[in-house]
């Protein structure tokens, strides 16, 4: 079965059935959002988003290893520029 799953990017390739164990509360919350028939699609999208986050975390860790961690004030300024909000980089503590 492992050979069948190789060579595909997240979201590509044929569907495969697996067994997934979730807590009752998590499953209930998912079903309330998407109904019983939407659970698989919801979990597929959630898994894709998690893979994207994991990849981004790895990229950031690699960048930090080469260049050192980002300056928090510079990040705040750029975040404010991106979101249209005011930067709190110069705010008094």
Image (cartoon, rainbow, N blue to C red):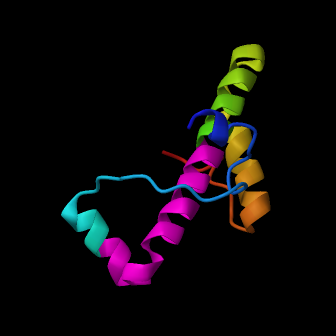
Whether 58 is drawn above or below 9: the answer is: above
Q: Position of residue 9 (x, y in %)?
A: 74, 46
In which image quadrant can residue 84 be found? bottom right
Query: Which is more toward the observer, 78 or 30?
Result: 30
Magenta span: predominant SS is helix
Whether 56 is drawn above or below 80: the answer is: above
Q: How many marks?
A: 0
Residue 22 belongs to the span the image colors magenta: no
Q: Left or right: 44 with respect to 39?
A: right
In which image quadrant can residue 81 be found? bottom right
The residue lying at 37 percent from left, 73 percent from top is 30
The residue lying at 29 percent from left, 52 percent from top is 21
Q: Position of residue 90 (x, y in %)?
A: 65, 47
Q: Position of residue 53 (x, y in %)?
A: 60, 45
Query: Which is more toward the observer, 63 or 74?
Result: 63
Q: Residue furthest top?
A: 66
Q: Left or right: 69 with respect to 20?
A: right
Range of magenta residues? 29-53
Q: Residue furthest left?
A: 24
Q: Left or right: 86 with respect to 54?
A: right
Q: Left or right: 77 with respect to 45?
A: right
In which image quadrant can residue 39 be found? bottom left
Residue 41 belongs to the span the image colors magenta: yes
The residue lying at 75 percent from left, 24 percent from top is 63
Q: Position of residue 88 (x, y in %)?
A: 62, 53
The residue lying at 56 percent from left, 38 percent from top is 1
Whether 86 is drawn above or below 77: the answer is: below
């Amino acid at each position: 079965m492992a050979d069948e799953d190789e060579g595909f990017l997240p979201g590509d390739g044929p569907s495969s059935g697996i067994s997934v164990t979730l807590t009752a509360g998590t499953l209930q919350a998912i079903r309330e959002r998407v109904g019983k028939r939407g659970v698989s699609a919801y979990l597929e999208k959630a898994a894709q988003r998690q893979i994207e986050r994991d990849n981004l975390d790895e990229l950031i860790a690699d960048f930090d290893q080469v260049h050192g961690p980002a300056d928090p004030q510079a990040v705040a300024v750029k975040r404010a520029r991106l979101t249209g909000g005011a930067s709190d980089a110069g705010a008094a503590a």
